[in-house]
Each structure stands twice: as structure tokens, then as C-alpha cells.
Amino acid sequence: MTAAGIHTREAGDPEAPLLLCLHGIGSSSAAFAPQLAGLADQVRVVAWDAPGYADSADPAHAPGLDGYADTAAALIRAHGGPAHVLGVSWGGVIALRLAARHPGLVASLIVADSSRGSGTDPDKAKAMRARAGQLAAEGPDAFAAARGPRLVSDAAPPALVQHVVATMAAAVRDPGYGYAAEAMAGADLTDDLPAITAPALVLCGEQDTVTGTDESQILAGGLEKSVYVTLSGAGHLANQERPEAFNAWVRAHLHVVARVPA
């Protein structure tokens, strides 16, 4: 796929530095509402619906992780890149692969509540592949109702939980979710990390029980240039649960790496 058929939500000055936001495996561009609202005075924020998600077209075949990374690269080129790339969870895996395959298009990385991929562990890979069948059996609404609440901390306000569940239910469908799950199940970016030269901010919610702080620290330790931050009071979706703190760290990162006014 190229950038054609990819739906985006955008905010900010088209002449400002580009911040491309890549969502998690059960989400969409709607997950970045706090960043679209909170960072648009500093950068041009572009949040995609991944191929086969929400308002983006279904891919003709399984893209694989490289296909998702290449589609993101095409989107950056279409917006005049390079870009600072913010990836949450699965989006972080795509962002890391993007930086490895297209280093000239990635000015810096913000990798939030992410991992090296589910391919680092056979049990994790098996569970990831099983999700497509669960979605087909349960339907998007029941699937989202079961999975969504796990993505935030126990203290998350009910309105946020409802938003996460509604976003997931509206975003996921066959075959896109199954393609994404297969790409995630086959991914192990352990060997990619040392070759990634883009400066990176790695964040993780302190109460993230999905990917967890240990995995985020492995990412930070494997990258050439990285800063690691734990966000208290947040689960897996730290960018939504602690948006002010999350955005403040992103602002600081962009100021340091690109002299973007804070």
C-alpha cells in the first residue's frame, strides 16, 4: 500500500515540524485526541488509522510489519517529512521498524507502552494470533468490552474506559485486525534496536500490565540514544490516561532534539 487510502486526523500549522502518531492494535486515530489538541501549537500532528482500521481502506493482502512501516513512510513523504514518530504499543513496534528501514524519514522517536513484538516469546505469539479468532467469534462490541478496560489503570475514570471501549469497537474489523495480529506475532525487534540512530523518548505507564515497564526499559536500553520515563497513575494507554504529563514529556523531547519551541 501507499499513503493512498489511509485516513488521518490532523491539527497544527502545515509548516511546523511533523509529528506522526501510530496507534495500538485495538485502536485508531481517535486515541490521539489529547495529542491533537495539546501539541498542535508546537508541531503538525498527523494521526493515522492504520491499513484496515476505522476509516482507512482494507489492504489487499497482509502487509506484514514491513508493509505497515513502508505505508507510514509513504505517509511521511506525502506530508513533506521527515517526521518525529510517536507510536503507542503496536504503533511503537511499527515506529521502530520504520526507523530501521527508513532512517532518513525519522527525525526522532517517541515509543510509548510498547515492546519488541510478540515474537520474543512463543506463548505471547500464540496468544496474539488467537485474537483474530476471538474478534470473529465475539464481534467488535463484545471484543472491545472485554479487552478495553485492561488497557487503563484501575483508577481510570469511567468516561475514559468508555472512550477506550468505544474507540476499539469502532476501529477493529476483519481482515485488518488479523493482519495486524499476525505482524505483531511474528515481530522480534531485538536485533533492530542497536542500529536505530534516531533519538528516542521511551515512556511507559507505571501500571501497564499489557507490555509493562520491564519491556519498555529493554527498548530504551537497546537503542543508541534514548531517555526512559515511567508515568505514574497510568496503565497501558498512558497518552490518554495522563495526557498532560505525557504531552509535557513529548514537548521536552522535541525541544531537545529539534529545538522546537516548548
Image (cartoon, rainbow, N blue to C red):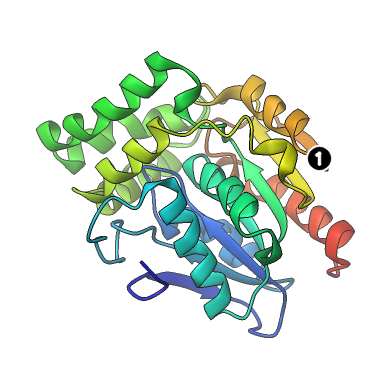
Mark 1, secondary structure of its residue: loop
In terms of depth relative to the viewer, which is nearer, 138 or 241?
138
Residue 139 location, quadrant: top left
Q: Is residue 190 visible?
A: yes
In terms of depth relative to the viewer, which is nearer, 165 or 100?
100
Q: Position of residue 169 (x, y in %)?
A: 26, 46
In terms of depth relative to the viewer, which is nearer, 32 or 162?
32
Q: Residue reaching furthest top? A: 123
Q: In the drawing, does residue 193 fall left or right of residue 174?
A: right
Q: In the drawing, does residue 174 fall left or right of residue 122?
A: left
Residue at image point 34% right, 50% down: 167
Q: Is residue 146 visible?
A: no
* Amino acid found under the numbered disc labelled 1: Glu
Instruction: Point out the image quarter for the N terminus.
Output: bottom left
Residue at image point 43% right, 58% down: 30
Residue at image point 57% right, 65% down: 36
Instruction: Point out the image quarter for the C terminus.
Output: bottom right
Q: In the drawing, does residue 120 fall left or right of residue 67?
A: right
Residue at image point 60% right, 69% down: 45
Residue 43 location, quadrant: bottom right
Q: Position of residue 257 (x, y in %)?
A: 85, 59
Q: Position of residue 111 (x, y in %)?
A: 64, 44
In the displayed structure, 91 sits above or below 257; it is: above
In the displayed structure, 213 sits above or below 71; it is: above
Q: Where is residue 78 in the image (x, y as percent from the top left)?
A: 52, 79
In terms of depth relative to the viewer, which is nearer, 76 or 44?
76
Residue annotated with mark 1: 224
Mark 1 Cα-neighbour bin, 10 Å: few <14, some 14–19, many ≥20: some
